[in-house]
Image (cartoon, helix red, strand yellow):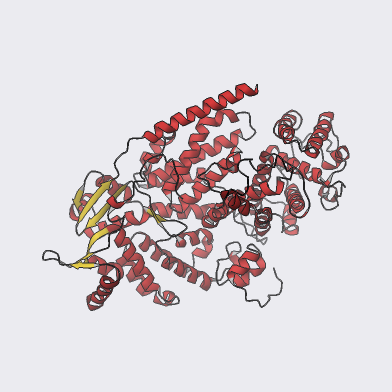
């Protein structure tokens, strides 16, 4: 610590594999990892970026994993509070509220390209766990796309992801989502036996 | 063992002067106590232990380590430390490595029965550095009992945790203690601790050994890590093995559950392994593994492993009654029941729990579990209480800021983990309600269910999606793993419920029989031995 910083351009993998716990490589690692052990060294903009990427990794629990590591007083920063609210809406599948809030925080979120698409993919993931047939307005709200753009979006998924569009009886359009073991629980393999003999990993 | 007694960098006691400052547990110290007096029984103890170590007599070492050391501690060193290392050194040829081992036990005794001073904490750190330094860089040819090697790693992590707590309580520190903190700011530094554990893992090549064992190219598990024939030392290998468990624990203490599980990954805990041999190691492994999975929302996995270990403890705890670790076993047992109660309240997979474990659980937590399902303020209070009781002693690893006003920050890390955990509970607060309605139907319309739940339809849809999201975890390979026993799907406006049918529990029956047989076989073995 306090040593002169050297100009090195190792990859993170190299840095970490050489010496995963050496504080002297912190400056080099700053772009990649959160400096969990030394809150004083934490760079807010970089941590914000990491958290946005963690939101984009949903349904994986990266975001809460990051929060476990960021000291509470740092989490009080305004930008973090916003991101925590956004994460809460995503965790509780309140997509309408999420998109409203995200629109207000565009300046923070724009830093990372592909944010919208990543969240839409997460929304579609949750819908696919839940629905065999999802009404069009529910889909529209979840991915925040409407009208002609939505038609185009759905066409694309009909062509590429196995979606099927169905007219319902005089009501809104229905989208049949691809079968999986979550929206067709009967497809689940019979692993339900209580105390396991073999333990799959 | 190194034959020359070369203790220039380790002889901290003479360098700093010894008597512990008053008010830190040293007050009760017997005034007539002379740290340099070596009673005959201690003389005999070190001479024999030294000889057994030289002769690689693991059995006798183990007897002395587990038995004699405890007995002598009970009889002669209830309120005082063991004789100083300088005093016993002449009886063991001033052997450097033996002296390091002796001091390791010396400090462990101080931590367990007395209360270490700031200086002793620092000295103990130095002793671990020297000891691990010899193992990592020297040539060690000892065979030590697994129990002892596990205790070394376990105690190393424990003392680190203890130091972080100690260091964070700044308000009550004396001027002298603050000075010490400043002077020895590298003592128990988090990077240092992680580096030693990591270095032991790497230098021992334990992950490669476990890999080769899978291919049948090496024996490790079958010999419990000992080398009976070749006579090569088991010390580095086993310290490396146990360091993986140590790393899991350190990362849990830091709130880094993902990294913790990654460190443990080379050990396949679904199989019998060397980590099972020493019960302390087995319990520490599963406790931290289960806790990390709980925090990662992999409830079913946590339930499965807690169930297995609790069943094991239930069956075998009687054999450990005389062990110095018995109290610790019971405490972790109780904590894991609390964690199991939490897991089952969030994810009611009761079919994963063996009936004896379940009845223990009901005895202890039935009332609280009923409360936790309610999701009102009282429910949160119960989650809070159980989490607080059963969680690891989280630490803030950063060095203290020694500027006025001095504050205590030893609770910070715990409060953050608790807050985030309760946040998760809050996000799931409506799930048990919707679950109890779904249980009553095979199909129900969104409108009707919304009316029962007293919410509007869009809100109900979000609750149902939340249920799906929360009941599916993502494993380390990115696979989606289901956690719920009660599942459903929605087609347009109708919810279709699918409950996995209760299966006849042959497995329980077989498991019971297997255990009974195992008990009988071990009973028979014992008879033969006598």
* Residue depicted at x 71% and y 30%: B67
Residue B28 coordinates in the image, percent (x, y): 74, 35
Residue B201 vs B273, above or below: the answer is below
| A84 vs B272: above or below | below
Q: Is residue B60 left or right of residue A39?
A: right
The image shows residue B286 at horizontal and vertical percentages of: 53, 44
Above or below residue B146? Residue B323 is above
Rendering coords of residue B420 (x, y %): 46, 55
Position of residue B87 in the picture relative to residue B351 (left or right): right
Q: Residue B263 falls in which quadrant of the image?
A: bottom right
Q: How many marks?
A: 0
Instruction: Specify whether residue B7 is in view.
Output: yes
Q: Quadrant of the N terminus of chain A?
A: bottom right
Q: Position of residue B211 (x, y in %)?
A: 58, 52
B73 horizontally vs A70: left or right: right
Residue B175 occupies quadrant: bottom right
Considering every residue shown, the one lying at the far left of the view is A170
- Residue B363 visible in the current orientation: no
């Amino acid at each position: 610590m306090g040593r002169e910083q050297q100009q090195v351009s190792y990859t993170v993998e190299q840095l970490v594999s050489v010496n995963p716990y050496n504080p002297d490589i912190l400056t080099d690692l700053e772009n990649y990892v959160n400096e969990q052990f030394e809150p004083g060294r934490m760079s807010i903009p970089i941590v914000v970026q990491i958290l946005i990427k963690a939101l984009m990794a949903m349904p994986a629990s990266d975001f809460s994993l990051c929060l476990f590591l960021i000291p509470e007083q740092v989490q009080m920063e305004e930008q973090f509070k916003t991101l925590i609210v956004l994460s809460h809406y995503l965790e509780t599948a309140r997509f309408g509220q999420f998109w409203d809030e995200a629109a207000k925080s565009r300046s923070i979120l724009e830093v990372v390209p592909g944010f919208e698409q990543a969240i839409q993919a997460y929304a579609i993931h949750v819908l696919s766990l839940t629905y065999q047939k999802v009404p069009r307005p529910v889909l529209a709200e979840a991915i925040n796309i409407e009208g002609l753009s939505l038609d185009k979006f759905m066409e694309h998924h009909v062509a590429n992801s196995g979606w099927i569009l169905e007219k319902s009886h005089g009501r809104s359009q229905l989208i049949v989502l691809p079968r999986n073991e979550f929206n067709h629980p009967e497809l689940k393999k019979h692993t339900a036996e209580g105390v396991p003999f073999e333990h799959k990993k | 063992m190194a034959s020359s007694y070369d203790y220039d960098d380790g002889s901290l006691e003479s360098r700093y002067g010894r008597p512990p400052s008053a008010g830190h547990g040293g007050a009760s110290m017997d005034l007539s106590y002379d740290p340099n007096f070596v009673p005959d029984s201690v003389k005999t103890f070190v001479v024999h232990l030294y000889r057994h170590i030289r002769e690689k007599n693991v059995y006798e070492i183990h007897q002395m380590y587990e038995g004699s050391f405890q007995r002598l501690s009970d009889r002669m060193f209830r309120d005082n430390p063991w004789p100083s290392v300088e005093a016993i050194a002449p009886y063991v040829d001033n052997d450097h490595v033996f002296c390091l081992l002796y001091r390791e036990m010396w400090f462990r005794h101080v931590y367990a029965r007395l209360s270490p001073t700031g200086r002793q904490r620092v000295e103990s750190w130095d002793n671990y550095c020297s000891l691990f330094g010899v193992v990592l860089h020297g040539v060690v040819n000892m065979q030590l009992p697994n129990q002892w090697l596990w205790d070394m790693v376990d105690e190393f992590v424990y003392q680190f945790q203890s130091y972080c707590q100690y260091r964070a309580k700044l308000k009550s520190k004396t001027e002298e203690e603050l000075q010490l903190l400043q002077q020895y700011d590298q003592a128990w530094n988090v990077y240092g601790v992680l580096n030693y554990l990591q270095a032991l893992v790497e230098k021992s090549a334990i992950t490669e050994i476990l890999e080769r064992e899978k291919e049948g190219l090496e024996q490790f598990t079958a010999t419990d890590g000992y080398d009976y024939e070749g006579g090569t030392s088991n010390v580095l290998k086993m310290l490396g093995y146990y360091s993986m468990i140590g790393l899991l624990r350190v990362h849990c203490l830091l709130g880094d559950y993902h990294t913790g599980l990654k460190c443990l990954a080379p050990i396949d805990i679904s199989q019998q392994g060397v980590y099972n041999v020493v019960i302390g190691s087995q319990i520490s492994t599963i406790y931290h593994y289960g806790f990390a999975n709980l925090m990662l929302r992999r409830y079913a996995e946590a339930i499965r492993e807690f169930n297995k270990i609790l069943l094991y403890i239930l069956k075998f705890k009687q054999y450990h009654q005389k062990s110095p670790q018995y109290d610790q076993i019971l405490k972790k047992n109780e904590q894991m029941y609390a964690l199991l109660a939490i897991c089952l309240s969030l994810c009611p997979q009761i079919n994963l729990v063996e009936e004896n474990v379940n009845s223990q659980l009901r005895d202890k937590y039935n009332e609280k579990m009923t409360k936790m399902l309610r999701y009102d303020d009282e429910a949160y209070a119960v989650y809070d209480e159980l989490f607080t009781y059963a969680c690891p002693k989280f630490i803030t690893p950063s060095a203290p800021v020694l500027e006025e006003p001095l504050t205590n920050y030893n609770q910070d890390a715990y409060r953050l983990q608790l807050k985030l955990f309760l946040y998760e509970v809050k996000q799931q607060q409506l799930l048990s309600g919707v679950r109890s309605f779904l249980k009553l139907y095979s199909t129900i319309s969104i409108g009707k269910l919304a009316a029962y739940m007293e919410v509007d339809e869009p809100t109900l849809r979000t609750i149902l999606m939340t249920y799906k999201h929360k009941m599916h975890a993502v494993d380390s390979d990115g696979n989606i793993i289901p956690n719920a026993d009660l599942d459903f799907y929605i087609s347009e406006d109708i919810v279709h419920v699918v409950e996995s049918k209760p299966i006849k529990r042959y497995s329980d029956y077989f498991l019971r029989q297997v255990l009974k047989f195992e008990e009988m076989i071990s009973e028979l073995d014992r008879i033969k031995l006598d």
